[in-house]
Image (tube, rainbow, N blue to C red):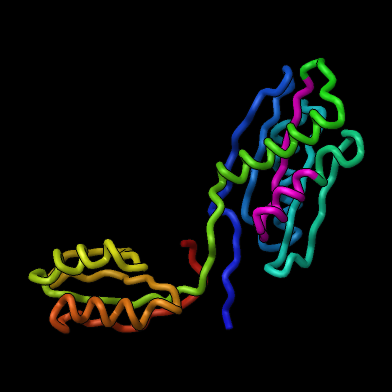
Amino acid sequence: MNTSYTTVRAEGRDEVVITKSRFIGYAAPCTTEEEALEFLQKIRAAHRDARHHCYAYVIGRNQGIMRYSDDGEPGGTAGMPMMDVLRGRGVVDCCVVVVRYFGGVLLGTGGLVRAYTKGCQIALDAAGVVQMEWTLRDLCELPYSCWDSLRHALERLPARLENVSFGVAVSFDLLTREKDRDSVLESLQNTTGRQLENIPAGEGYASW
């Protein structure tokens, strides 16, 4: 059985200034530890003049690989709080790096924990946390006379369209989660007077 999991949609970046220190959070999807380390090195290269490049990553849908680093900050004030955010939100196959430019004011242990927690949170929000579910794709074709009815029906159904084209008829890709496919197709067939033609065209994980 294919189970759903939570990750980020794409690479994202955001920043916050806390008591004169600048914290820049980056997050990216990574399916291997090598990809996570490459992402970390890319961020380090882009911010060579920063004092700290703290990180946390979780690889594997079963959280098989979990690594983090304080990168010179007091122990337990950066990497672990970032890891706590990832685990708390259930995010896997993801690497987060928080870069700090020191502003001259010491934040203290509690302040650092809050700052790196915030840096991780805004990085994830910028990258877009998504639910990945096993998804089926159908190639569909429909007469023009049924197009408006189908679009209205889809507004209340758990499905989405991709690659819509208008030729002799309307053709499109219909994406549905495995658990919803049969009921969605039956509803669309009823809506269109059984004029919807569909051919299964693949399956895999997609974001919802």
- Range shown magenta: 81-102
Percent x, y of residue 134: 50, 74
**142 and 155: which is toward the camera:** 155
How many marks can you see? 0
Q: Quadrant of residue 132?
A: bottom right
Q: Give the left or right position of residue 60, taking residue 5 as reference.
A: right
- Location of residue 175 (image quadrant): bottom left
- The single residue placed furthest to the right in the displayed view is 75
Rendered residue at 68%/36% (across/down):
118
Location of residue 25 in the rendering, given as x and y in whole percent from the top left corner: 66, 37
| Residue ID at (53%, 54%) | 9
Residue 24's x, y, as percent?
67, 32
**Going by the image, does 28 lie left or right of 172?**
right
**Left or right: 155, with 29 as reference point:** left
Q: Is residue 61 above or below residue 126?
A: below
Q: Is residue 98 magenta?
A: yes
Q: Quadrant of the N terminus?
A: bottom right
Residue 7 magenta-highlighted: no
Q: Residue at x 70, y 42 (%)?
A: 42
Figure check: 63 above or below 109: below
Residue at figure coordinates x 72%, y 50% from the top left: 38
Q: Position of residue 173 (x, y in %)?
A: 31, 70
Left or right: 72, with 89 as reference point: right
